[in-house]
Every structure is written in structure tokens, then in C-alpha cells.
């Protein structure tokens, strides 16, 4: 294979590739990326939403504060000029924790300690349930089945009666061998006398029946004296759900203005005897430290009772900073407070639920956390505020923050004939608002996530469609012409009917291609038209010359006449080659393919060429065996004619022309190589276009249609043709690639 | 009485040249520049042979129209189309109008005169039906050199003069390769390109294949020429 080895890409081809790359894809953001970045800017919406919710929170807190102020002032004016209510003499000892029924039932007839439980219940009336509300020492894991308390008190002229129904699954009585007393189920009673003296009574028993009562030290472990208290009588009866305690206390033991607190202590493990739960009748056990005087005025309490506010604590104080009445608690009901989040998201998929809950916890601060931060005792701050109100005589309000917990506190003085009798102080938790805010944020977050997702998908779809359309337009435009700039189609159909700018761009490009196509067709038809027009004058010249010769026989050998005839001959061959390409194009459309052996054709042709061109050596090299292709042999021979003409014309004198035929992966490769001068770089891309020639010899005709015919025939056979300089720039080879015939049908 | 030849050509120079050369060879020439005058002339006097240009001035197919007129007047009148148009469509049209020959410009006057002679002789043969017609046959092909009639498997094949000459050359020595040069000479058109010969052969094959779709007597010898394949008997 002479001259075929070591083919390498010419620098020109490399440049061409680079140029194509440069005009096509450049590094940088694509439309889709840009639009998605735009979507990211939508993230400003949740920020804005968060800010507005915060703003709303401030606004609501302010509104709440104002409402509280109004309530405070309302209560203060309600209580104005009622000095009688603040008389230290009217106070009664109050059993702490009766938030819903603050006063003991007054009974006519004394109750017997040995009377039946039902007798007591009917005398006392409705019992207060301490299972669902007021549980502050049991914690969220509290289970009503394990320990529940129903409690009621009654009072007659002499005695104070207390009744407890206790549900307890495991009853542990006192072990007489143990010295310390805090290791069995027991009832603790704390009495704070109006003088402030605190007495602690522990009621326990080793068996059902009479209860032993001891006066205890403040650690609830050791009795002050080994003797039981005799004044207080108690009986424990077992029931099927637990036990019942009936208690009778002389009123004079308590005195006027005393405070009383009961705590049911539950021990469930006989081995360790550790206190597992305590239920207290004090709704807010640490709100009022034991030791502070509480002079409850029942009438005052009655007055403010209807003013109950949710999650608010209303207190009435006298000049001596003594609490005269209170209603409500700043803490929400326990269950609601602790179960808020799980109720909100009680979905069927636990994993999703916890994931979402965690997600919200992470983004938003859960108000449940706020409750944990809420101080149980804020009396120091309360006294400071009360002091300012009582001394200045002005209503005051303030907002306090304890971690995530918010507390709104308002206080107003109560006036009576120019002097301050006392003050109203209302504390309300802002966490209800927070939980409102939390829910708003939750909804907003869901809404936003939905909108964000929708917009993202919409923009993604839109941008994908846009990118696709732009890409399609680019593809169509690139496919409309070969890299050499030859037009393949003269319109772009896909996307041209769209009414937007891209559609109009497509139409513009399509129109441009159409005009270009018309122009190209005009150029392609030009040789034919030209030839046709030239034929008639040429015929005039030719026939005139022949007539001249006929009538003037003596001129037969005239050199001028001879030159004229030569000129006519050249003109004629020019016109023939002009029409050849055009008529070939038309003729090819009528040709019918046949199967034949290309090697036989090449061999025959090469033989003929050698005979016609004795000045060159024309050889063929090929692999053994026939190469069957489908095509028109005459046209392929015509193509070979042109290739040989070209090789002879530009080859060196006495040079070698090699026609080689070989198979490659795609089909058959026919190469005609000569040893002439290298191709000029500037025409190598356009060599196979009509009217492009590298010849500069004026005596010969070079219309540049020969290689155009080669291209037409090659393309008709679904092949391609390229020209390139041989290795070492010694000679040029033209390579025609043709597809091999499919396996012949048997 | 001299033989009358009608020349219809819109280009004055070419027309005059035809007239000059044909007159010089002893023919009585009637020259017309356009279709109306030619039609009037044909009405007056029917020529023995007509040379027609296809495009007459603005009339793109004037020559074809005239040919049809002449066919109405005489079914056997030899007609030669002499045109600058070299498309297969035009050739087929001329064939359909049973023109006897189709020559593309530029034409050699010398060969033109030869063709005119030949066609007139054939025309005469057809009219007189001389029994000594020299018919020779090659396999299924019958060829009458005098009347230019060709039959394939007994059916007439309608060939132009040039095509007839090519068949005549190919069948003279069946199996022998006729070179492009020899084929070019026999067309009597002066310089003829290989491609033009290929075109003639293609058209001849098509005409035979219209009668016999399996016709494969004319074989291509790539790079050299063509041969008429002997019948395998």
C-alpha cells in the first residue's frame, strides 16, 4: 500500500475542529443552571415569612399585654374602695390547690372518722380529681392507673375534714422495723400557720385502719418526736382500686389564715421502697414558697373567680405584700402541654412523623421547650414589680423571658379613698402565642415548601423545554449545512410554528436558509444555464468556420482557421463539462442500483487509463477477493474517470498514480493517490464544491467540476469523499468511502 | 426535382449556415425563423426532411409542436431535432414524436450533411420496400441496415439514427469489445465524451428493456467500452 501508510491529520483539520469547538460550546452557566439559581433566590420568601411571623408575634404579644393591662385595671377598679376585702381579720385558712373549688364544703353535722367512704363522699360533695390536672411532680411519664387521687374537704364549726380516694396498683404499708418513715405509701400534710410556722405531719400505717400521725422534720424522714399526734385522726380503708383515707383535723390546730397542703406519696417497689410519685394538692407547688403568709379572703376569691384567664395567674395582694386571692396558673394543663407536638403530627408513618417533627424542631423553636424554661418560682420579680406599683401608684407591665419561655406580667394598684389598698398582678404565659406562632410557621413552612417545590419543578420543566428547543434549533442549524459550509436543507421545520421569540428566531434562520438555498441552487444551475446559452453562439462559430472551409478549400490548412477550430473545441469541452455535473445530478435520480464487483470495475478502468495516459504509471492495489457493492457501475466509472483526470493533471510528470481499494470497518475505501504538489490549505475544505479548482494553467480548462462530480457520485452511493496531503506532503490522495453491500439475499 | 429540406431555426446566423451548407450539397432548402411561418410553409409544400430547433424564440417547445404537425401530414417524414437542449426529458419527448434523430449543438456541418443523406436514403427505402433489403440477425436481434429497422424478439425497437449506428457497430462482431473511440466515431458528432457514449448506451438499454426486462446483451467493459454479448446457445 504505497503512500497510504502513516496517514496523519493535517494541521488544517485540527484547526477546523478547534474552530468548531470554539463556535459551539463555551464554558459557563447554561440557561437551566441560571434559572435554577433564580429559584434559589426564592429562598428569600421563607426568610421573609419567618420575619413576618416574628413581627406578628411581637404585635400579638403587645396586644396580649394591652389586654392584660386592661384586665388588670378592670380588676383593680372592681376592687377599688373595698377596703373591707383587705381587712387582715377576714382572712380564712385556705386549703391550697382548690383551684376549681377553693372553699371547703361547709357541713352541718360532724362526720365520723369511722363512717363509710360513701358517707363521706356524699357529705363532702364533688371530689376534685388530681389525676388529669395539677400533676407537677409526676412528670410526663405519669400513668393514671398507677396512681390517681380524688380529694375533697369539708368544714364544720369545730373540725376540718379531708377525704382522699387513692388509686394505687401496689400498696406498700409501713415496715415497723425501719426507722425512717419515707419508705411507704403515705400522706403528708403541711400546715402553715398564719404566723408562718410550718408543721409537717406524716400519716402512715402498717395495716388498714387507724393511721399513725407524726410531726416530721423538714426532710420527711425522721419524726420530731416518737409520739404520734393525737389531735388528728385518720383512717385508711382498702378498696378494690387502692385505698381511702379519711382525716379529721381540729380547726384550732390549723388556726386562722393557715395554709394546708396534702401530698400523696406513692412507693411501688417493696424492695427498694423508693418514692416513685408524689401527687400534691398544690397546683403549683413551688409558686408559693412554704413560709410565706397567705391570707386568703374567700370573698375576694369569689370576686375574681369568674375572671379566669387561660394560662394566666391572677393574684390580689394587700399592702403588706400578702397574697389575698389567686386564680389560675401560668402553666397550661399538663397533658396538653407535653403532648402538643405529637398530637399535631399524629400521622400514620411514625418515621416520617418523627423526621418531620425533628425537622420542625430544628427550624422552629418548639413552644414545648419554652415550658421547660418557664420558672416555677418567679416571686422575686413579682415582689419587685409589686413594690414599684404599690409605691408609685401606677399600673406597670413588663415582659419577661426565661430562655424560650415568655411571661407577660401586668400589675395595677387598687385604690381606696386616696390610698393604695393593694395591687392586682396578672401573669400570663406568652407561650400560648408562641405555640400559635409555631403552628403558623408550620403551616407556612408546608405552604412554602409546596410552592418552592412547585416553582422549582415548573422552572425546571420550563428551562428544560427551553434548553431543548434552543438545543434543537442549534442542532437543526448545524445540520442544515456541512462543516464545509455546504447547505443540506433550506428550512427548519421543528419549532418554527411557535409564536414566541424562539419560534421567530427559528423562522428567521429558516428564511435565511431558504434564501441561501435558492441562491445555492441558482449557483448550481448556473453552469447548465450558461452552457445552454453558450451552445447557440458556439454553433454559429462552428458552422461558420465549416462553411468557410467548405467554400474556401484552400484554407483547409490555414493556421488561423486551425486555431479557431481549436478554440471552438476547447469551448465545447468547457461547455460539456459544465453541463455534465448538472445533468448528472438529474440523471442520478433515475438510476437503478445493481450489485456488482467493484474490483473488476477498478481493474478494467485502470487498464484503460494506463493506455490513455502513457506519461504516467497507473497501478491498482487491492486486497484479494471481490468487493460487492450496490450502485451504478457507469457512474462509479465516471467518478473514477474524474479522480484519474485529477490525479494525472496535478501529478508529477512520469509520476505514479496508485488506485487502491481496501476494506475498513465502515465499508470500502477507494483511494487515488498521486505524487504531485500538496493541496493549497485555503481550498482543501471546498475542493469538492462546484467551480473550485487549484489549477492556474491558462492553456487548460479547469472549471473545478471534476471533483464535484466525484462528490455527487460518492454521495449518491451513500459515501463520502475527502482529499488530503499524503504523509510528508508528497502528493495528494483522495479517499472515497463507500458502504459495502449488505449480505446478498440467498 | 431536388430534395426539399425544411430548416426551422430562430437564430439567423445558424439558419443561414445550415442553408448554405445544405444548398452547397444540392438540396433545396426552405428556411423558417418561427413556428407560424414554418406551419404555413409546410401547408404549402411538404418537405422531404425537416431540421427542427426545439426552442423557437419565446416558444420553449415550438419544435415539438412542429414535429407533431408534420407527423399529421406525413407519418414517415424524417425529422431531425437540432438543439442546445441535452436533457433526457427532451430526448424522450422527441422519441415519442417519432423523430428520427436528435443532435445536440454544436453540430458539425459535415456530419449533419452525412446524417441528412443517411436519413433520406432510409426514408426512400421505407417508401419503396425493396426486397433486397440487407437484413442480418444476431440471436434475437434483427437489423435492417437499409431501412434502419431493428427488431428484438420480433418486436420493433424504436431507435434514433445515432442509436441505430451504435447497435450496428456493436453487433457487427458480437463478443468483440468496441472501444469508446470507435463508438464515438460511429455517432458522427465529432468530439464525443465517454459520458455521452454511456448516455447513448443507457438509453438503448432502456429501450430494449421496455420490451424485455431481462435484456442484458450490451455489456460494459469498464474503462474500455462496450460489447454485444453473444447468445449462449
Image: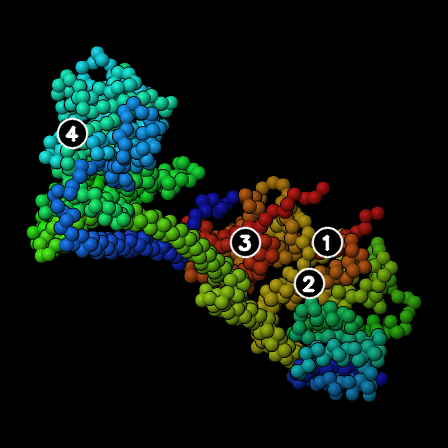
Residue A352 appears left or right of A79: right
Front tag of 3 and 1: 3
Residue beneath label 4, please? Answer: A253
Q: Is residue A433 above or below residue A536?
A: above
The chain letter under disc 4 is A
Q: Is residue A393 above or below residue A293?
A: below
Residue beneath label 3, please? Answer: A720
The quarter of the image holding the C terminus of chain A is: top right
Q: Residues within 10 Å of mark 2 (few under 14, many from 20)?
A: some
- Does dot 4 land on a helix, a strand or a loop? helix
- Tell me whether circle 3 and circle 1 mark residues in contact (CB < 8 Å): no
Front tag of 3 and 2: 3
Task: Report, in whole angstroms, how far the alpha carbon at label 4 lies from the one at label 1.
Answer: 144 Å
Residue beneath label 2, please? Answer: B199
Q: Are marks 3 and 2 on the same chain?
A: no
Front tag of 2 and 4: 4
- Does dot 2 land on a helix, a strand or a loop? helix
Q: Is residue A239 above or below residue B197?
A: above
Amino acid at each position: 500500500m504505497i503512500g497510504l501508510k502513516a496517514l496523519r491529520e493535517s494541521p488544517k483539520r485540527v484547526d477546523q475542529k478547534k474552530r468548531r469547538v470554539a463556535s459551539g460550546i463555551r464554558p459557563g452557566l447554561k440557561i437551566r443552571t441560571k434559572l435554577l439559581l433564580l429559584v434559589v433566590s426564592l429562598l428569600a420568601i421563607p426568610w421573609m415569612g419567618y420575619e413576618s411571623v416574628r413581627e406578628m408575634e411581637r404585635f400579638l404579644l403587645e396586644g396580649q399585654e394591652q389586654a392584660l393591662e386592661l384586665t388588670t385595671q378592670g380588676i383593680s377598679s372592681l376592687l377599688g374602695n373595698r377596703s373591707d376585702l383587705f381587712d387582715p381579720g377576714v382572712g380564712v385558712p385556705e386549703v391550697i390547690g382548690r383551684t376549681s373549688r377553693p372553699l371547703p364544703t361547709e357541713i352541718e353535722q360532724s362526720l365520723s372518722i369511722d363512717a363509710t367512704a360513701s358517707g363521706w363522699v356524699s357529705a363532702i360533695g364533688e371530689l376534685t380529681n388530681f389525676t388529669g390536672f395539677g400533676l407537677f411532680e409526676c412528670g410526663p411519664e405519669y400513668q393514671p392507673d398507677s396512681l390517681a387521687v380524688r380529694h375533697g374537704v369539708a368544714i364544720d364549726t369545730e373540725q376540718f375534714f379531708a377525704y382522699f380516694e387513692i388509686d394505687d396498683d401496689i400498696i406498700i404499708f409501713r415496715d415497723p422495723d425501719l426507722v425512717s418513715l419515707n419508705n411507704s405509701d403515705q400522706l403528708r400534710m403541711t400546715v402553715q400557720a398564719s404566723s408562718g410556722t410550718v408543721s409537717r405531719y406524716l400519716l402512715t400505717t402498717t395495716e388498714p385502719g387507724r393511721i399513725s400521725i407524726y410531726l416530721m422534720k423538714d426532710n420527711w424522714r425522721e419524726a420530731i418526736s416518737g409520739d404520734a399526734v393525737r389531735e388528728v385522726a385518720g383512717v385508711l380503708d382498702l378498696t378494690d382500686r387502692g385505698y381511702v383515707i379519711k382525716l379529721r383535723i381540729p380547726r384550732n390546730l390549723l388556726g386562722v389564715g393557715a395554709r394546708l397542703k396534702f401530698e400523696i406519696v406513692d412507693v411501688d417497689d417493696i424492695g427498694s421502697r423508693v418514692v416513685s410519685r408524689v401527687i400534691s394538692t398544690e397546683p403549683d407547688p413551688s409558686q408559693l414558697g412554704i413560709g410565706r403568709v397567705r391570707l386568703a379572703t374567700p370573698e375576694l376569691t369569689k370576686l375574681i373567680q369568674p375572671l379566669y384567664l387561660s394560662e394566666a395567674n391572677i393574684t390580689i395582694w394587700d399592702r403588706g405584700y400578702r397574697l389575698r386571692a389567686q386564680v389560675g396558673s401560668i402553666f397550661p394543663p399538663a397533658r396538653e402541654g407535653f403532648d402538643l407536638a405529637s398530637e399535631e403530627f399524629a400521622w400514620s408513618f411514625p418515621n416520617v412523623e418523627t423526621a418531620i417533627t425533628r425537622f420542625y424542631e430544628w427550624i422552629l423553636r418548639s413552644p414545648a421547650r419554652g415550658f421547660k424554661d418557664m420558672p416555677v418560682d418567679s416571686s422575686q420579680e413579682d415582689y419587685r414589680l409589686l413594690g414599684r406599683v404599690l409605691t408609685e401608684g401606677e399600673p406597670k407591665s413588663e415582659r419577661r423571658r426565661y430562655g424560650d419561655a415568655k411571661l407577660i406580667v401586668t400589675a395595677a394598684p387598687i385604690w381606696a379613698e386616696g390610698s393604695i389598698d393593694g395591687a392586682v398582678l396578672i401573669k400570663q404565659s406568652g407561650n400560648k402565642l408562641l405555640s400559635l406562632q409555631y403552628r403558623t410557621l408550620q403551616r407556612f413552612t408546608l405552604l412554602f415548601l409546596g410552592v418552592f417545590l412547585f416553582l422549582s419543578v415548573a422552572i425546571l420543566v420550563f428551562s428544560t423545554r427551553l434548553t431543548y428547543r434552543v438545543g434543537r434549533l442549534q442542532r437543526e442549524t448545524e445540520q442544515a449545512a456541512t462543516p464545509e459550509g455546504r447547505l443540506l436543507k433550506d428550512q427548519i421545520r421543528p419549532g418554527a410554528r411557535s409564536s414566541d421569540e424562539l419560534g421567530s428566531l427559528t423562522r428567521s434562520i429558516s428564511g435565511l436558509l431558504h434564501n441561501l438555498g435558492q441562491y445555492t441552487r441558482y449557483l448550481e444551475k448556473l453552469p447548465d444555464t450558461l452552457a445552454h446559452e453558450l451552445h447557440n453562439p458556439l454553433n454559429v462559430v462552428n458552422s461558420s468556420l465549416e462553411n468557410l472551409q467548405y467554400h474556401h478549400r484552400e484554407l483547409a490548412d490555414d493556421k488561423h482557421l486551425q486555431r479557431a477550430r481549436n478554440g471552438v473545441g476547447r469551448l465545447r469541452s468547457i461547455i460539456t463539462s459544465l453541463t455534465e455535473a448538472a445533468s448528472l445530478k438529474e440523471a442520478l435520480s433515475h438510476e437503478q442500483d445493481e450489485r456488482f464487483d467493484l474490483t473488476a470495475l477498478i481493474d478494467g478502468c485502470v487498464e484503460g487509463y494506463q493506455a490513455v495516459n502513457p506519461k504516467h504509471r497507473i497501478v491498482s492495489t487491492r486486497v484479494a477477493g471481490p468487493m460487492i457493492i450496490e450502485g451504478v457501475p457507469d457512474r462509479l466509472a465516471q467518478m473514477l474517470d474524474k479522480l484519474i483526470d485529477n490525479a494525472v493533471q496535478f501529478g508529477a510528470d512520469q509520476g505514479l498514480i496508485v488506485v487502491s481499494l481496501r476494506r475498513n470497518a465502515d465499508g470500502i475505501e477507494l483511494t487515488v493517490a498521486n505524487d504531485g504538489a500538496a493541496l493549497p490549505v485555503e481550498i482543501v475544505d471546498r475542493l469538492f464544491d462546484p467551480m473550485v479548482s487549484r489549477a492556474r494553467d491558462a492553456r487548460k480548462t479547469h472549471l473545478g467540476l471534476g471533483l464535484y462530480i466525484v462528490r455527487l457520485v460518492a454521495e449518491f452511493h451513500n459515501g463520502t469523499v475527502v482529499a488530503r496531503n499524503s504523509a510528508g506532503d508528497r502528493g495528494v490522495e483522495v479517499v472515497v468511502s463507500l458502504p459495502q453491500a449488505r449480505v446478498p439475499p440467498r | 426535382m431536388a430534395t426539399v429540406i425544411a430548416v426551422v431555426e430562430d437564430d439567423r446566423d445558424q439558419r443561414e449556415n445550415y442553408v448554405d451548407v445544405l444548398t452547397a450539397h444540392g438540396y433545396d432548402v426552405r428556411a423558417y425563423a418561427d413556428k407560424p411561418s414554418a406551419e404555413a410553409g409546410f401547408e404549402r409544400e411538404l418537405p422531404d426532411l425537416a431540421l427542427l430547433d426545439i426552442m423557437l424564440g419565446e416558444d420553449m417547445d415550438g419544435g415539438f409542436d412542429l414535429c407533431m404537425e408534420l407527423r399529421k401530414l406525413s407519418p414517415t417524414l424524417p425529422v431531425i431535432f437540432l438543439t442546445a437542449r441535452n436533457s433526457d426529458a427532451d430526448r424522450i419527448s422527441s422519441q415519442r414524436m417519432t423523430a428520427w434523430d436528435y443532435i445536440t449543438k454544436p453540430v458539425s456541418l459535415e456530419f449533419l450533411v452525412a446524417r441528412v443523406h443517411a436519413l433520406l436514403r432510409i426514408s426512400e427505402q421505407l417508401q419503396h420496400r425493396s426486397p433486397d433489403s440487407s437484413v442480418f440477425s444476431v440471436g434475437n436481434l434483427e437489423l435492417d441496415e437499409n431501412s434502419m429497422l431493428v427488431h428484438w424478439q420480433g418486436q420493433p425497437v424504436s431507435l434514433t439514427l445515432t442509436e441505430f449506428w451504435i447497435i450496428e457497430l456493436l453487433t457487427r462482431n458480437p463478443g468483440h469489445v468496441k472501444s469508446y473511440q470507435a463508438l464515438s466515431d460511429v455517432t458522427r458528432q465529432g468530439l464525443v465524451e465517454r459520458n455521452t457514449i454511456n448516455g447513448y448506451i443507457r438509453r438503448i438499454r432502456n429501450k430494449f428493456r421496455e420490451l424485455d426486462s431481462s435484456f442484458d446483451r450490451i455489456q460494459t467493459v469498464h474503462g474500455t467500452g462496450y460489447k454485444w454479448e453473444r447468445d449462449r446457445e
